[in-house]
Amino acid sequence: MFNEVPDRYDLINALMTFRLDQMWRRKAAAECLQGHPVNILDLCTGTGDLALMLTERAGRDTRVTALDFSQPMLDVAGRKARQRQASRQLQFILGDAGRLPFPDEAFDVIGIAFAFRNLTFRNPHTATYLAETRRVLKSGGKFVIVETSQPRSAVLRRFFHGYLAAVVAPLGWLVSGHRGAYRYLAWSMRHFYAPDELTALLAGQGFRHIVSRPLLGGVAALHVAFK
């Protein structure tokens, strides 16, 4: 599914979020860079926006590794990196989040932007993905997640869910030509975890000191957890 939409992926994200997705990624990047980490992993990087933000804002000693399982997505990310003359400290890797090609405790920080839902929502391999993430994170290291969420306000939640069904799914289909991808996107966003459910999921896999911060009334959230 992801291999079929990369050329329109960024455009659709910008249209359906009114470019707020970039502001939310910047918040995630700022959180990842606190404390001046040396090694950062952008997990499920997609078209590379979080990785590029990290690279452009990081110090000279910080290395950013960006992994994704979709080569077409990585091709787009690579083109963007070349256009923006991204630092040599950024490396893109084709790989599987369930079998990460890194040694234990390789990263100070792991970030993931709008892909955690795909790894964990009604996914039979959730425990494997989270175990692998935790394995390659250093003891005391930080896991930063920016993802869609569920507003606490019932009124806002109903509006958000209606917007997903009436606008996001049709718009994604119209622009990308891939109906299934954006029907899945809208459906998974409507049913994804609320912050307390996501906290329980992370705690159950051994993460600790978990904090969630709502974004735009809770339609998205920034989650921070530690190993």
Image: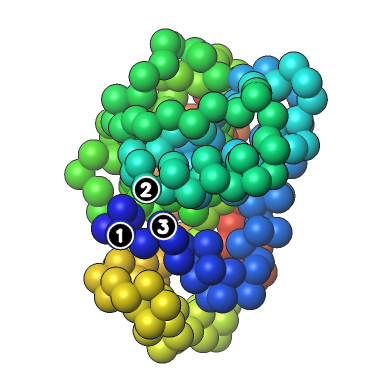
The answer to which of 91 and 203 lies nearer the viewer is 91
**Picture layout, residue 144 above or below residue 46:** above
Location of residue 17 with respect to 71 vertically, above or below: below
Question: Residue 78 at x, y = what percent?
Answer: 52, 40
- Image check: 202 left or right of 181? right
Report which residue position mark 2 lands on: 72
Identify the amino acid type marked 1: Glu
Upstream in sequence: badge 2 or badge 3: 3
Q: Residue 6 got which mark?
A: 3
Q: Label 2 near label 1: C-beta < 8 Å?
A: yes
Circle 3 crowding by C-alpha within 10 Å: few under 14, some 14–19, many from 20: many
Colour scheme of the rendered structure: rainbow
Residue drawn at x 44%, y 42% is 74
Q: Is residue 165 visible?
A: no
Q: CA distance from mark 2 to mark 3?
A: 6 Å
Residue holding disc 1: 4
The answer to whether mark 2 and mark 3 are in CB contact below 8 A is yes
Q: Earlier in the sequence, mark 1 or mark 2?
A: 1
- Residue 157 in picture, x, y percent from top left: 51, 78
Where residue 198 appears, x then y in whole percent? Answer: 45, 49
**Secondary structure under badge 3?**
helix
Secondary-structure class at tag 1: helix
Q: CA distance from mark 3 to mark 1?
A: 6 Å
| Vertical order, 81 against 219 (above or below) | above
